[in-house]
Image (spheres, rainbow, N blue to C red):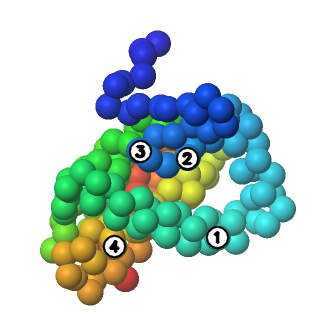
Amino acid sequence: MTKMAPELPIEVDSETGVWTTDALPMLYVPRHFFINNHVAVEEALGAEKYAEILYDAGYKSAWHWCEKEAELHGLTGVAVFEHYMTRLSQRGWGRFITEQIDLEEGTAQVRLEHSAFVYQLGKVGRKIEYMFTGWFAGAMDQILSARGSELRTVAEQVQSAAEEGHDHGLFVVKPQ
């Protein structure tokens, strides 16, 4: 087990108990708690409807986060996307690796290793990390907008380590 990296500080307000990282209030919950809640909502709504809701919410959240972090750290372009992948990787969702990114074309490919969903649920024979798809399009579109581009993207999970024959997840971002 490794210790928390100093570049990802967690501050805890001794009076309120609020955890903060990157100037954002955070919730610290066990992985099983989050995933059990996620599965319960998926079962109630159906995976397709839940994925649609999460896509839109994740898109907005990623756009906002990337906008604020770019401003705070003076980042632009691919550096914003890489910073986002680093921070996601440091928060226990899994390890996100940018395999390809082209801002002119509006494309990216993100590999996911050590998925929290797969660790918790195992090989269930389907793509289960759809929660992340909107994050990648939202991040890409914020970066494109900051560059003055009108191009907008969509993201899709094309494979999951929860499927037989795969040891990692893969997401593709492309123009709409």
The answer to whether 103 appears left or right of 130 in the picture is left
Q: Where is residue 129 in the image (x, y as percent from the top left)?
A: 55, 51
Question: Relative to 130, does residue 99 appear above or below in the rendering?
Answer: above
- Packing grade of label 3 (10 A; few <14, some 14-19, many >=20) is some
Q: Position of residue 79 (x, y in %)?
A: 20, 53
Question: Relative to 110, does residue 115 appear above or below in the rendering?
Answer: above
Q: Position of residue 124 (x, y in %)?
A: 66, 43
Quarter that holds the C terminus: bottom left
The answer to whether 139 appears left or right of 21 in the picture is left
Q: Name the residue under label 2.
A: 25
Front one among 32 and 149: 149
* Type of amino acid at the residue the image marks with label 4: Asp
Whether residue 150 is visible, yes or no, is yes
Specify the farthest residue to the right.
44
Q: Mark 1 points at which residue?
A: 53
**Does the CB distance between marks 1 and 3 fall below 8 Å?**
no
Name the front one of labels 4 and 2: 2
- Packing grade of label 2 (10 A; few <14, some 14-19, many >=20) is few
Front one among 60 and 162: 60
Marks 2/1: CA distance?
22 Å
Residue at x 22% of width, y 82% of height? 149
Marks 3/4: CA distance?
21 Å
Q: Mark 3 points at which residue?
A: 22
Task: Say which element carries label 3.
Answer: loop
Specify the farthest residue to the front.
15
Q: Mark 4 points at which residue?
A: 141
N-terminal label among 2 and 1 = 2
Task: Say which element carries label 2.
Answer: strand
Task: Say which element carries label 4.
Answer: helix
N-terminal label among 3 and 4 = 3
